[in-house]
Image (cartoon, rainbow, N blue to C red):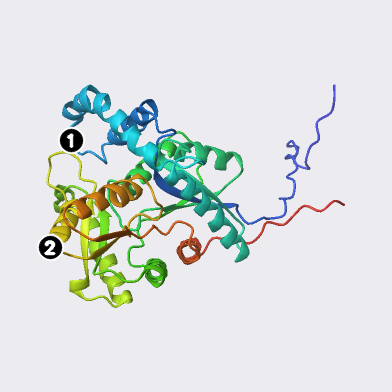
Amino acid sequence: MPQQDLHAGGSPAAPAISAPPTANPPHTAVLWCNLGSPDAPTAGAVRTYLADFLGDPRVVEIPRALWLPILHGIILRVRPAKSAAKYASIWLKEGSPLKVWSARQARLLDDKLQASGHSVTVRDAMRYANPSITARLDALQAEGIERVLVLQAYPQYSATTTASVIDDISAWTRHQRRLPELRFVNQYHDDALYIEALAQSVEAYWQQQGRPDQLVMSFHGIPERNIRLGDPYQSQCLQTARLLAARLGLSDAQHRVTFQSRFGRARWLEPYTEPTLRALGASGTGRVDVMCPGFPADCLETLEEIAMEGREAFLHAGGKDFRYIPCLNDSPAWIDALAGIAERHLAGWDTRPRPQNRPR
């Protein structure tokens, strides 16, 4: 019989504990989240996307028993074909503009943070459609990521957008045994770097194209009821507009704030963008420039709803000259702003480069 090793007191020896490996900084990721877009400009792809998007109770706050029959029985039968035609009108060779710009922003942010000495991984993700947030988190988990900063493409906080992303991530955490540390950037509507990036984009456009009679800042709308329930979105949009107008040196008479993309019969934030453009055209305004400060990347709502439909509304009403100022997209000032926001929220996490194992 093999003999058992005993201590002096006669008890079995405790198993040896190996020395811990050389400590490495926990690996960190930044998840750059945007709303999403259909995988293709087809009725089938749009139907799948809209079912996910409009089925989110954060987006449509109507009791499920009332809303879902309307969504699946009416809207998803009628709207996909019309929306697909709109998507086709702005589709790029590489795919959806929103996805193309978001992926490029993530790559440039990764490069910027790496150049600043941060060992981080930046990935883009979509709340609806692909690449999904949960798929990205699964992949980051498999890569050994231990810390995740969730940075969203929504400068102004709204439960319909910002909170929905947090909901999605929270649902993912319920199925994980070991969770990464998580941080969320909820808003940056008044961030100085963000305002500066917007101002530089406008100034660069005006330097080439001249100045308009009126600058319209169009933000995505939400139901007024959301504001009454405590959503800070409207006040944050107005604060962004005030800061940007001040930075550009515009008087109250030279700019206005509107809200676009109304859906359904409920009363949404006013004034609405398209009626405002028609009124400006009818009043004899010579030139109107429209920008969308709440959209960091060009998408259907900017390229089709504003640059196409908004233009038609203004000119048809009698306006003379309509200009659309593109979103921030991949402008260097915007990437600098993203990096600054990310660095501020990464503070306290060790993002030094991880030591490389050297052969003995």
Quadrant location of residue 286? bottom left
The quadrant of the rendering that contains the N terminus is top right
Image x and y of residue 318, in percent:
17, 57
Q: Position of residue 74 (x, y in %)?
A: 21, 25
Of callouts 2 and 1, the N-terminal one: 1
Q: Position of residue 297 (x, y in %)?
A: 41, 53
Residue under the point 79% across and 37% down: 6
- Closer to the camera in the image, 186 or 312: 312
Amino acid found under the numbered disc labelled 2: Ser
Q: Amino acid at mark 1?
A: Ile
Q: Secondary structure at mark 2?
A: loop
Q: Is residue 241 visible?
A: yes
**Number of numbered callouts drawn:** 2
Q: Is residue 114 left or right of residue 161?
A: right
Viewer-closest of 357 and 200: 200
Mark 2 and mark 1: Cα distance apart in space? 38 Å
Residue furthest to the bottom in view is 249
Q: Which mark is drawn over residue 283?
A: 2
